Image: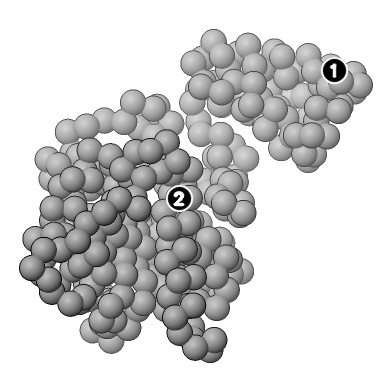
C-alpha cells in the first residue's frame, strides 16, 4: 500500500478515536516503523512509495494501540526532552514540555553561579523524584561540568532512568526522597524536582495520563496535592549548601500556596515564581539559608 494512503487511513482512525494530534501521531508511528525521519517519510508519501506488507501490518497494529489511547511514547519507546530522546515505557511518567522550561531555569541558574566562581568549580546537582531521569539528564548533557545525582523510589522508573542516565554519567539512587542519608546534608549546590502534585480527589482528564502514568508519579498527597512538594522543599533545605538554590514544578493553581509556604520559612529567601512557555505559573524556586530579611523578596522570573 502507498505510504500516503496508510497515513491517511491511520489519521482518520486516530481522529475518530479522539486522539488530539492524529496526523502527527500517524506520521511518527510510520516513521518509527520504517526507521526513517518524518522528513524522509514526507518525501516517500509525495513520491508514492509503497510500504511492505510486513511494515504495513506492524504500523496498523501500532495505530490500533494508539487508538486505544496507549501513549505514543510507549509505542515508540522514546520521549523527546530538550535535546535528548529518553527511553520510556510502562511504569514511568512520560516527561512533559512544561518540565523543559524548569530545566532551562536551572541551567540558567547554574550558568550564573559558574560565572561567579573559579573555572575549576564543579557544581553538585540532585534531581529528587527523577522518574525517567529527564531533569537530571538535561542538566548533565547541557552543563557537563556538573556532578549530577538523581533519586527515584519506583523500581520500574529506576529501570528506565538507568537507561537514560548511565550514558551521561549521572549517579542514580533508588530511595525515598524524604529519607536522605546524613552524609548528603549541606553538600549540593542545586536541587531540582518535578514531584507528584495532583490532589487526591482529582482525576486527570487525559486517558493516557489517567490509565498509563503511574499513580506514584501523579498524586502529591493530601486534599491540595502539596504533601510531596512540601517534602521536596524540606529535603532541599537539608541537602543544600548555604546559599544553595532549589526549584520544583507544580500545578498553576498551587503557585500562590507554595510561594506562601516558602515565605513563611525564615531559612528561605529569594522566592521566585516561574512561568512555562504559555505564561502559566508552573515552578517555584528559592535560596536556602540565605540572609534573613524583614520582608522576603518575591518576584516573577
Q: Residue at x 55, y 50 (%)?
A: 81
For the N terminus, the image quarter is top right
Answer few, some or many: residues within 10 Å of disc 2's Cα (few below 14, many 20 plus, some between 14 and 19). some
Measure the C-alpha gap from mark 2 to mark 1.
40 Å
From where the camera sits, is residue 143 visible? Answer: yes
- Chosen colour scheme: one colour
The tag earlier along the polypeptide, 2 or 1, is: 1
Q: Residue at x 77, y 39 (%)?
A: 37
Q: How many marks?
A: 2
Q: Secondary structure at mark 2?
A: helix
Q: Is residue 38 left or right of residue 293?
A: right
Place of residue 251 in the rendered image (x, y in percent of width and height, measured from the top left): 28, 41
Place of residue 196 in the rendered image (x, y in percent of width and height, measured from the top left): 29, 49
> Foreground mark, 2 or 1?
2
Q: Nearer the viewer, residue 96 or 255?
A: 255
Place of residue 237 in the rendered image (x, y in percent of width and height, measured from the top left): 22, 72
Q: Which quarter of the picture shows residue 35?
A: top right
Answer few, some or many: residues within 10 Å of disc 1's Cα (few below 14, many 20 plus, some between 14 and 19). some
In the displayed structure, 35 sits above or below 150; it is above
Q: Is residue 270 left or right of residue 17?
A: left
Q: Residue at x 64, y 26 (%)?
A: 24
Q: Are marks 2 and 1 in contact (CB under 8 Å)?
A: no
Q: Secondary structure at mark 1?
A: loop
Place of residue 286 in the rendered image (x, y in percent of width and height, measured from the top left): 26, 64
Q: Which residue is mark 2?
A: 101
Q: Which residue is mark 1?
A: 2
Q: Is residue 18 left or right of residue 47?
A: left
Q: Nearer the viewer, residue 13 or 127?
A: 127
In the displayed structure, 153 sits above or below 212; it is below
Amino acid at each position: 500500500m502507498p505510504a500516503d494512503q496508510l497515513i491517511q487511513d491511520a489519521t482518520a482512525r486516530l481522529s475518530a478515536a479522539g486522539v488530539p494530534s492524529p496526523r502527527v501521531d500517524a506520521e511518527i508511528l510510520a516513521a518509527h516503523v520504517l526507521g526513517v525521519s518524518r522528513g524522509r517519510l514526507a518525501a516517500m508519501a509525495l513520491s508514492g512509495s509503497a510500504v511492505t506488507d510486513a511494515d504495513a501490518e506492524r504500523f496498523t497494529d501500532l495505530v490500533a494501540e494508539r487508538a486505544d489511547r496507549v501513549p505514543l511514547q510507549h509505542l515508540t519507546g522514546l520521549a523527546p526532552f530538550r535535546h535528548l530522546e529518553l527511553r520510556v515505557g510502562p511504569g514511568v511518567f512520560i516527561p512533559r514540555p512544561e518540565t523543559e522550561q524548569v530545566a532551562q531555569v536551572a541551567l540558567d541558574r547554574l550558568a550564573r553561579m559558574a560565572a561567579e566562581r573559579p573555572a575549576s568549580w564543579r557544581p553538585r546537582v540532585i534531581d529528587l523524584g527523577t522518574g525517567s531521569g529527564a531533569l537530571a539528564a538535561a542538566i548533565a548533557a547541557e552543563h557537563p561540568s556538573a556532578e549530577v545525582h538523581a533519586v527515584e523510589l519506583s523500581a520500574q522508573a529506576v529501570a528506565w532512568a538507568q537507561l537514560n542516565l548511565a550514558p551521561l554519567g549521572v549517579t542514580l539512587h533508588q530511595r525515598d526522597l524524604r529519607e536522605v542519608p546524613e552524609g548528603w546534608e549541606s553538600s549540593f549546590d542545586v536541587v531540582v524536582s518535578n514531584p507528584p502534585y495532583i490532589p487526591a480527589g482529582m482525576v486527570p482528564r487525559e486517558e493516557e495520563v489517567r490509565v498509563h502514568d503511574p499513580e506514584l508519579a501523579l498524586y502529591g498527597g493530601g486534599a491540595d496535592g502539596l504533601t510531596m512538594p512540601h517534602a521536596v522543599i524540606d529535603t532541599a533545605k537539608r541537602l543544600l549548601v548555604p546559599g544553595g538554590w532549589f526549584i520544583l514544578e507544580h500545578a498553576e493553581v498551587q503557585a500562590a500556596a507554595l510561594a506562601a509556604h516558602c515565605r513563611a520559612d525564615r531559612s528561605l529567601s529569594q522566592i521566585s515564581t516561574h512561568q512555562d512557555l504559555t505564561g502559566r505559573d508552573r515552578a517555584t524556586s528559592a535560596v536556602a539559608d540565605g540572609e534573613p530579611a524583614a520582608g522576603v523578596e518575591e518576584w516573577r522570573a
